[in-house]
Amino acid sequence: MSLKEKISDYVEKLKEKRKALSVPEFGEIIYFSPINVLEWEKIVKLSGDSLSAGNVFTIIVKVEDAEGNKIFSLEDRDTLEKVDWRITNQIANEIRRLTILDGTKEISTDKIPSA
């Protein structure tokens, strides 16, 4: 299997890594999958140097309902910015945590040949 085929398989498997998170403050369960390269670029571009904006845009870009539909759009930014920062921080951190844990668990430098 070529590297391109392996990457395509990996991208397809990301859909299976979707997680649920209960948000008791709203009595809801939200869903999300690991952040991909294009999504990360969008989050960074929109949030600039602001951590709180990064949290809000992470939620906008990643949070879905049970059927896989995006819950928020850029028009919801003002509303999300009025939510207690601890809630948006917790949600965004869970999304990033899934991305970090999933993205690095199989990376090993011991198989990289030395120069």
Image: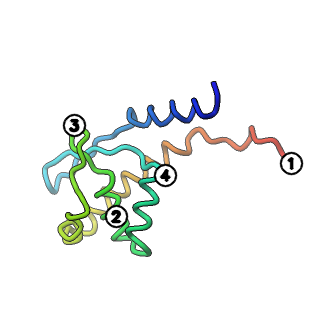
Badge 3: how crowded within 10 Å, few (<14), some, or many (20+)?
few
Q: Quarter-wise, where is residue 15 in the image? A: top left
Q: Residue at x 17, y 52 (%)?
A: 24
SS assignment at label 1: loop
Relative to 112, is 74 above or below? below
Q: Nearer the viewer, mark 4 or mark 1?
A: 4
Task: Give the residue pinned by disc 3.
Answer: 67
How far apart marks 2 and 4 lie (CA) works out to: 17 Å
Q: Position of residue 97 (x, y in %)?
A: 43, 51
Task: Give the residue pinned by disc 2.
Answer: 55
In the rendered structure, which amino acid carries the disc numbered 2? Asn
Nearest to N terminus: mark 2 or mark 4: 4
**Residue 109 shown left or right of residue 64 in the figure:** right
Badge 1: how crowded within 10 Å, few (<14), some, or many (20+)?
few
Q: Residue at x 49, y 50 (%)?
A: 100
How far apart marks 4 and 1 lie (CA) works out to: 28 Å
Task: Give the residue pinned by disc 1.
Answer: 115
How far apart marks 1 and 3 lie (CA) works out to: 48 Å
SS assignment at label 2: helix
Badge 2: how crowded within 10 Å, few (<14), some, or many (20+)?
many
